[in-house]
Image (spheres, helix red, strand yellow):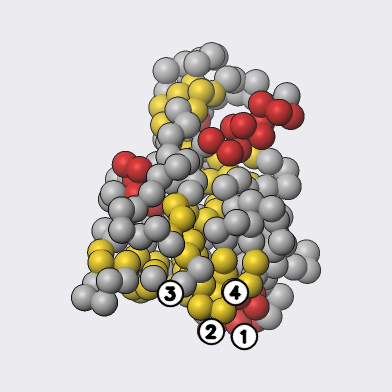
């Protein structure tokens, strides 16, 4: 679940909490696009009817929307339960920062991230670590970052240690250096993106912990401030 390690699981691409998908492909694409991290999710059928949780990320490829619920509600849930997501957040913009695109995050959660503008007019965002562009793998070249995620490659053990990848947890905020996600995913020197860890590590080449991006700029107008508590679970009050 959110807040626990995303590494060394006996499994592959493990998704925390509840994974949902609409059987209709077009409807599921809409869900993946409009759902934002922090959005309220409510169970509307089954024994757990009325239980509320929140979106923790989107997993591209398999196209799952990932949701946190507390343990008591999880015990009442079953495959086939219907969950309603209150999609809210796409289109979010920061005044006076036209070069920064926000995506995939509920505005109410965004306001809790303790983002500050420094004396140089740069936004400072709390993150647990900074990841260089050469470690970004599966998902690079995707047409949009407003849906799904892309992976931090973990094949190099020295890099995993150097950049704190071994310590990553579900829900952690990370900074992606020289990674432009404003119109799809690409390398661009000087660009900066901020994302959330949404699924676990993977043994397949080119794969690893998944990152759903929440902010991106083609310039260096975003700066990371290292904070080991930079996890959505802390901002949402579950850790």
Residue 127 visible here: yes
Question: Which residue: 57% across, 70% down?
Answer: 179
Element assignment for label 4: strand
Task: From the viewer's side, name the closer residue of 229 and 39.
Answer: 39
Query: Which residue lies under the disc numbered 3?
Result: 220
Q: Position of residue 156 (x, y in %)?
A: 68, 80
Query: Which residue lies under the disc numbered 1?
Result: 158
Q: Position of residue 5 (x, y in %)?
A: 51, 60
Element assignment for label 1: helix
Element assignment for label 3: loop
How many angstroms separate mark 1 from mark 3 (CA)? 27 Å
Q: Position of residue 150 (x, y in %)?
A: 64, 58
Mark nearer the N terminus (2 vs 3): 2
Residue 151 visible here: no
Element assignment for label 2: helix
Numbered circle sitting on residue 162: 2
Q: Quadrant of residue 227?
A: bottom left
Q: Residues within 10 Å of mark 2 (few under 14, many from 20)?
A: few
Question: Which residue: 48% across, 61% down?
Answer: 216
Mark nearer the N terminus (1 vs 3): 1
Disc number lying in front (2 or 4): 4
Q: Is residue 97 above or below residue 69?
A: below
How many angstroms separate mark 2 from mark 3 (CA)? 23 Å
Direction from residue 182 to residue 96 in the image, left or right: left
Mark nearer the N terminus (2 vs 4): 2
Query: Which residue lies under the disc numbered 4?
Result: 188
How many angstroms separate mark 2 from mark 4 (CA)? 22 Å
How many angstroms separate mark 2 from mark 1 (CA)? 6 Å
Q: Residues within 10 Å of mark 3 (few under 14, many from 20)?
A: some
Judged from this view, the residue extending furthest toward the right is 205
How many angstroms separate mark 3 from mark 4 (CA)? 11 Å
């Amino acid at each position: 679940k959110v807040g626990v390690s995303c590494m060394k699981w006996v499994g592959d691409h493990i998704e925390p909490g509840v994974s949902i998908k609409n059987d209709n492909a077009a409807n599921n694409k809409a869900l993946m696009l409009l759902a934002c991290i922090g959005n309220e999710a409510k169970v509307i059928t089954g024994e757990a009817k009325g239980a509320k949780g929140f979106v923790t990320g989107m997993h591209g490829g398999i196209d799952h929307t990932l949701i946190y619920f507390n343990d008591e509600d999880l015990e009442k849930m079953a495959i086939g339960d219907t969950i309603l997501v209150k999609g809210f957040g796409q289109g979010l913009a920061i005044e006076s920062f036209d070069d920064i695109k926000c995506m995939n995050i509920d505005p109410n959660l965004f306001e809790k991230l303790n983002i500050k503008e420094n004396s140089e007019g740069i936004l400072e965002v709390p993150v647990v670590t900074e990841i260089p562009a050469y470690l970004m793998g599966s998902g690079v070249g995707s047409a949009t970052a407003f849906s799904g995620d892309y992976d931090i490659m973990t094949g190099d053990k020295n890099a995993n240690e150097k950049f704190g990848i071994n310590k990553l947890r579900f829900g952690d905020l990370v900074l992606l250096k020289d990674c432009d996600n404003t119109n799809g995913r690409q390398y661009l020197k000087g660009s900066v993106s901020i994302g959330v860890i949404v699924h676990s590590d993977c043994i397949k080449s080119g794969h690893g912990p998944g990152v759903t991006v929440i902010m991106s700029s083609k310039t260096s107008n975003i700066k990371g401030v290292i904070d080991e508590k930079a996890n959505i679970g802390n901002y949402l009050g579950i850790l």
